[in-house]
Amino acid sequence: MKIIRKRYIPEEEIDISGDIILFHNEDILITKWLPIHKRQDIVNGMSCLFFKEGIKISKMYNSDNRLLYTYCDIVRTNIKDDTLIIEDLLLDVVIYPDKTYKVLDIDELIELRKNNKISEDLMLEALSKLNYLLNDIYNGFTLDVLEKRFWEV
């Protein structure tokens, strides 16, 4: 299966088919990966994409294999032929090991909408998925629990 990551800012499509697929069914896709661009802080990571929820939970690790943070992307997925397209809907939540978190890129979503680069429906979809994710975080982060079931795969 070919996997493409599509982003609005910067506007790009990147083939991430080199990621190692650990598990895949109709509900989730779990992958291990190396950063697209070499970084000093992040050596590798693992992601769990929840298709129905439109959320991708990624763990970022340093050279000591210590968790730096958990990065949650709001996404839309589309399968075309044998290609999975993961469209980044801009909104993100970063969760640190001490359980503090930040919501990111609301300003980018607003700017794209103001400039008619995304539809109102897409903006509302992103906000709805963010709301779902934040409620899950407030209630114990069950999405992370599911993802951890496969962590040692």
Image (cartoon, rainbow, N blue to C red):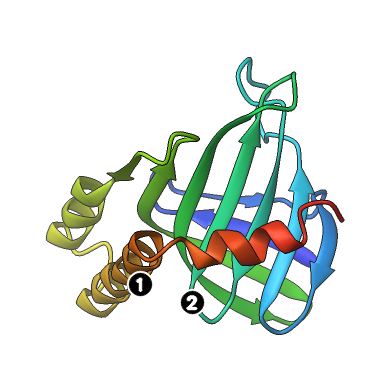
Q: Is residue 70 above or below residue 25?
A: above
Q: Residue at x 67, y 80 (%)?
A: 80
Where residue 34 sits: x, y (%)? 75, 36
Q: Amino acid at mark 2?
A: Glu
| Front-lying residue, 132 or 2 | 132
Image vertical order of residue 93 relative to residue 88, above or below = above
x, y percentage for residue 31? Answer: 76, 55
Q: Along the horizontal axis of the image, is 81 left or right of 41?
A: right
Can you tell which mark lies on residue 53? 2
Q: Earlier in the sequence, mark 1 or mark 2?
A: 2
Give the left or right position of residue 135, taking residue 66 as reference: left
**Dot 1 corresponds to which residue?**
132
The C terminus: image quadrant: bottom right
The image shows residue 44 at horizontal and vertical percentages of 73, 33
CB under 8 Å between discs 1 and 2: yes
Snapshot quadrant of residue 48: bottom right
Residue 10 visible in the displayed image:
no
Q: Residue at x 35, y 72 (%)?
A: 132
- CA distance for labels 1 and 2: 8 Å
Q: Position of residue 85 (x, y in %)?
A: 61, 68
